[in-house]
Amino acid sequence: MQALLHYSLAGGFASPRIVRTLEAVSYLVPHSRSRGNDANSTSLTEAISLISRASADRTLSRLLETFQFVLDVMGCSAPAESAHNDPFTENDNFQQDHVAHQGGIAHIVPGGDGWRSAVRVRLLHGVARWRVQERWKKEGRFDNAVPISQEDLAATLAAFSTIPIWCLNKLGIQPSDSEASAYLALWRHVGFYLGIEPKILLRLFTSTRTADKFLATAALHLFSDDATHAPENPADAQTTILRGPTIPILVAVSNRPPLHTSLEYNIALTRYLLGPSLSAHLELPDTSLRVRLRMHAFLFVQRIPYYFARCYPRKRWLEKRRTVLREGMVRTLWWNLGLSKTTFRPRTMVRDGHAAPEESSAKDGELAPGVAEQEAVRPDPVRAKVLTKLWSEVWQEMVAVDYPRPPHADHFEFRRKQLLSTYTYRKLKRLRTILLRLTLLQMTEIMPEQGRAGLSLPSPINMDWQYPDRDVDAPVYLLVYAPTDPSHTWRDLHWSVAWPTSSPSTLDTPADIVAWRHIQVETYDVKTDPAPQPRYVFWGACTKSADENATAAEKLQLGTFPKAQRKQIEELAWETAKNRDRYIDMQIPAIASVLKASLPAGAS
């Protein structure tokens, strides 16, 4: 919206050729046959003072109607459309059923909000074109240019489809090539409804690069009209520039809800987007350093949700933000329009405040009788409160996720506290307390069981073929592991029931143990997903070489068992640890039952 307001409308519509048409139809610029003493005003301050409050309100109303058209074709009006009863489609069941099955393009196909708005704007252009030609005939003006011609429409379409992408890149928000192409394709479709020749659309709006070139060429041609219509009096030169919509638009949107931005701020933003050359051509004054710093600070705050969404994987947050923005913009627009939704009907002519009394009318700029009632929307304070709450939740979640963790706090645990529900966190905290009492490491981050196969692995790597379990008595230990890296606490092994195995030629002294037979919980690191996810869990026996984790683990000897009884322990482990949904609830009873069944079998 900032790109459309401060660049496309405030800057692009300042072309002298477009200004003559805007002035003739009283759109953004009031019409007057004679400007009288206004022509002697060469001061920007004096020119701003001549813009009355009523004129600024009319300009704001036209801008809001233009923004509603943009929201309609972008599909942003659909969520709140229940608040408006359209007399043209109220009984058209065929159109409603047809639109309902179009999915995400329902707003732009025949019968949708965007389609209706585009067709009505096309009819409005036809009425405006006829009015301009009739007015020029009455005033004795002869202009070979056709008002609202194909060139004007194509240039305006380029301003609405290309300039926003330019401005997004300048503001640090870079859309992808596919997103830019999709945005251009949408406006190419809208251009067909607006009456632009298909050959123009197919030639100039098939790619973003072609559209960029066309917009630059059209701007050079439209603004080169200054040379052919340059006034002889130098004092009138600046007046010609001040006649354009740039200053009236910026005055109209200044000090308005919901942002209440000042005129200096809007001028600074317009200069920043237009660049120095076009800003100098439009005679936009430079602003103070304080205003420019405030503008850049505000633009930075606007970019925060965009950067956050690129790093934050939770899609529900992004969907919530989009829903609030779409419906919130529409409802804010309707509120600024006086709780109405324009249907793009022709209005009566508007003359400026310096016209003769007999030439002005109290009904200038009014709609036909009955149209205002048809455009009215019903307020919905309940839904407004819901949207306000959702918007608050969006920012609260951003702050909660980005809040810096306290010193010496475990990173994973701290984030889990922020994102998990209170019930789940208390459950994990209680489990950690129980495990600490059993002299085991905390297992708060062990996730639900995925079955013995686990992820894509049919079974863990088993070294039983190289280090078979010998038919001798062997000590059985409860191994409690200490993570080798503190950052890997939630990914390492936590405990294991194990006994040493080796080839017959080696001795079973602690220094000579080269392999262990484990019954353990295994958690595997998933490199493609850094977020905490369920890991592989295996409860059967597995032979592994003696690594640094097993060597450094604390060992509690449970007894000395012959091979037959060790096999019995393996079978008990398989029978105890079934594939269950609630692994956290069953892990303590499972290990307890294994140990309880194993000790009578031959514990010393």
Image: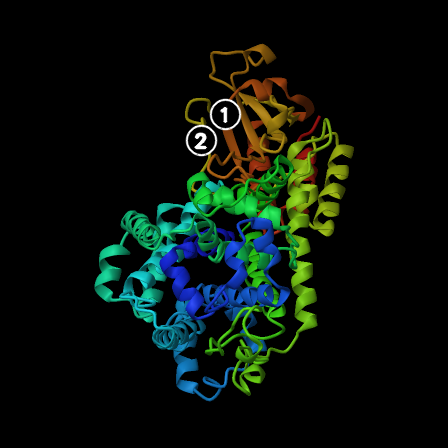
Can you say whether 346 is above or below 53 in the image? below
Label at residue 461: 2
Q: Is residue 76 visible?
A: no
Q: Residue tagged by mark 1?
A: 544
Q: Secondary structure at mark 1?
A: strand
| Secondary structure beneath label 2 | loop
Please give left or right for residue 271 compared with residue 487 in the image: left
To which quarter of the image does residue 577 belong? Answer: top right
Q: Position of residue 3 (x, y in %)?
A: 48, 51
Q: Nearer the viewer, residue 571 or 64?
A: 64
- Residue nearest the observer in this picture, 116 or 39: 39
Residues at badges 2 and 1 in contact (C-beta under 8 Å)? yes
Indicate whether 207 appears above or below 362.
above
Label 2: how many Cα within 10 Å (few below 14, some 14–19, many 20+): few
Q: Residue 254, image x and y in percent?
A: 62, 55
**How many residues crowd around disc 1 within 10 Å: few (fewer than 14), some, or many (20 or more)?**
many
Count the marks. Answer: 2
Q: Amino acid at mark 2?
A: Ile
Taking 237 as reference, is 258 left or right? right
Q: Position of residue 37 (x, y in %)?
A: 54, 60
Quadrant where the image shows the C terminus: top right
Q: Is residue 496 above or below residue 392?
A: above
- Whole-angstrom CA distance, mark 2 to mark 1, is 8 Å
